[in-house]
Image (cartoon, grey):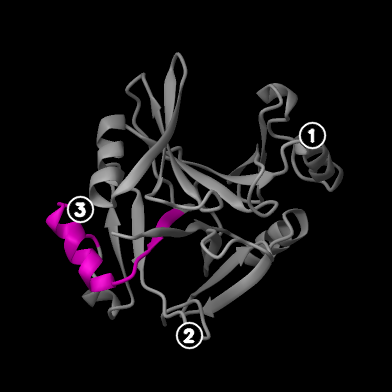
Amino acid sequence: MDGTLDHVMLRVTDLDESLEWYQTHLGYEEKDRYEGDGFTIVYLGPEDMHEDGAMLELTHNEGADDLEVGDAWGHIAVRVPEDELEERYQQLMDDGVEDYRDPESCDYNYAFVTDPDGHEIEIVKRDYGAEWSIDHTMIRVEDADEALGFWTRKFEYEHTGRWEADTFSNYFVKPDGAADEEMAVELTYNYDGRSYEMGDAWGHLCVRVDDLEEDWDQLLIREAADYRDPESNDQMYAFTKDQDGHEIELLERDPDAESLFPF
């Protein structure tokens, strides 16, 4: 299965405020927009993002003005040049972004800010990828072996790295042969056996596939959850879930289409 991580979706309470935040502070531009019945979806990303770089999808539902950011959802991480972490963080502070976890508190290896809805954004140092492009998305899992098995067996992803501490471990997975600029999934496992709440502010990860029907059938053979099949979505997309209930969208894009959306 050749599935590139296409985007990560977050729900927001005030779309205009969120768009202004990401466009002002991260320099994102609007890639496409879909106005549905009672909801709006906007794709965002850096102007010069890699062709297989992941976009940020912001979804706003009418009347959704009290979203809960659960602890099963972790963060997205965005890239800055290796020697510019402190400078970029200070610029965000000067521009009025909330001081959440500064570089000093993170041993100058990374930093964190939060967007208007409380979604955490990690700032990581990288020598590749467009500035502020999405490096990885972190989700918390209750069983590391099951989580790694899900991504490596069902999606044929590679286990590309790990970081182990006294109380938790981080595992990274990515499509086989993916470019450095593509997004990875970070699986965080805490050793204390805790469980997590999803919350309704966390949306999903999206995997872009070559053949929706064929890849969906392959996932079912591999015993992935039959959550929302292609037929129930007018053959435009489908959804499965991992062992912890994180939603994963499958989407096939027409490279010649004028819109990024299959609607």
Q: Which mark is residue 257?
A: 2
Amino acid type, callout 3: Ala
Q: Residue furthest top?
A: 166
Picture coordinates of residue 220 (x, y %)? 16, 59
Locate the N terminus by quadrant. Answer: bottom left
Give the camera-side residue of 158 and 99: 158
The reply to whether the magenta stretch includes residue 122 is no
Crowding at mark 1 (Cα within 10 Å: few <14, some 14-19, many 20+): some
Earlier sequence position, callout 2 versus callout 1: 1
Find disc 1 in the rendering and name its residue.
Answer: 86
Picture coordinates of residue 131 (x, y %)? 70, 52
Q: Residue at x 53, y 63 (%)?
A: 57
Q: Secondary structure at mark 2?
A: loop
Is 2 placed left or right of 78 in the picture?
left
Q: Residue at x 64, y 47 (%)?
A: 128
Picture coordinates of residue 29 (x, y %)? 69, 67
Find disc 3 in the rendering and name its residue.
Answer: 224
Q: Residue at x 23, y 72 (%)?
A: 213
Alpha-carbon span between mark 3 and mark 2: 30 Å
Circle 3 or circle 2, nearest the eye: 2
Earlier sequence position, callout 1 versus callout 3: 1
Amino acid type, callout 2: Ala
Is 73 placed left or right of 152 in the picture?
right
- Residues shaded magenta: 203-227
Alpha-carbon span between mark 2 and mark 1: 41 Å
In the picture shown, does residue 183 fall above or below 229?
above
Crowding at mark 3 (Cα within 10 Å: few <14, some 14-19, many 20+): some
Q: Residue at x 25, y 36 (%)?
A: 146
